[in-house]
Image (cartoon, helix red, strand yellow):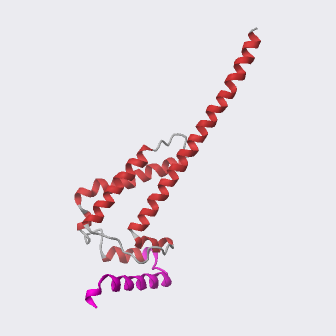
Amino acid sequence: MKFLQTVLLSSIFIPLKQVIVSAQKHDLEARLNSFHAAIDAEWQYRLKTHPEMTAYVGDARYNDRLTNFSAEAIAREEKEDKRELALFTAIDSSGFPPEDVLNKQLMIRTLRQPIEGAPFKEWEMPVNQMNGIRTFHDAVLEEGPLPLDVLEDHVRMWIVQQKSSAPALQ
């Protein structure tokens, strides 16, 4: 009788355990997919709002734009940073591979820094000991100049933008 009970209980619990493990695996995959989609969405947002960055990654989609440094744009970006910080903080990373756990930690840190710095209004200080023409020059020396075709595209798109945005000046 004991043997029969053991066989019966085993036939119930082993498939149940497989179902639980399968559900946990599916949950982990869903969370990982959600996390990777959130990273991609954040990257696309950064490319769109900071189009000069696209030149360095070889993406020409936003060559006709420049970063908007208006107070409204800064406020929108801070609001978006807070939304994304809440999103990334809410993602459960238990069971994630170590590189994805690190990516989550770095993303949270990257989003938290401008939020914490917002009261200091760094955007109102375009030239200081850390930013200005000298740092641009240093970046060009360190990272190398833009490829000529990318630079030409930027100049061409900038000219088109200037002509279309200021018809009263013509």
10 shown above or below 139: above
Q: Nearer the viewer, residue 140 or 51?
A: 51
Please, which residue is most extreme toward the top here? 1
Residue found 46% across the figure and 63% down from its top: 44
Q: Is residue 94 left or right of residue 22?
A: left
Q: How far across and down, in percent of the image, does residue 11 sit?
A: 72, 22
| In this view, 66 is above or below 46 | below
- Of residue 122 and residue 67, the one placed in the foreground of this image is 67
The question of residue 74 being in magenta is answered with no
- Give the tally of numbered discs: 0
Relative to the observer, which residue lies in front, 71 or 131?
A: 71
Residue at screen point 29% across, 74% down = 132
Q: Residue furthest bottom?
A: 170
Task: Give percent across and percent down for residue 10.
Answer: 71, 21
Task: Name the spot of residue 126 as percent of width and height, x first.
Answer: 26, 71
Task: Name the residue at 41% across, 71% down.
Answer: 51
> Does 163 lie within the magenta span?
yes
* Rendered-image quadrant of the N terminus: top right
Q: Is residue 71 left or right of residue 40?
A: left
Q: Main secondary structure of the magenta part?
A: helix
Q: Residue at x 51, y 49 (%)?
A: 34
For the C terminus, the quadrant is bottom left
In the displayed structure, 116 sits above or below 15; it is below
Residue 100 rendering spot, x and y as whole percentages? 52, 49
Horizontally, is 142 left or right of 7 in the view? left
Magenta-colored span: 141-170
Q: Is residue 46 left or right of residue 74?
A: right
Q: Is residue 151 above or below residue 103?
A: below
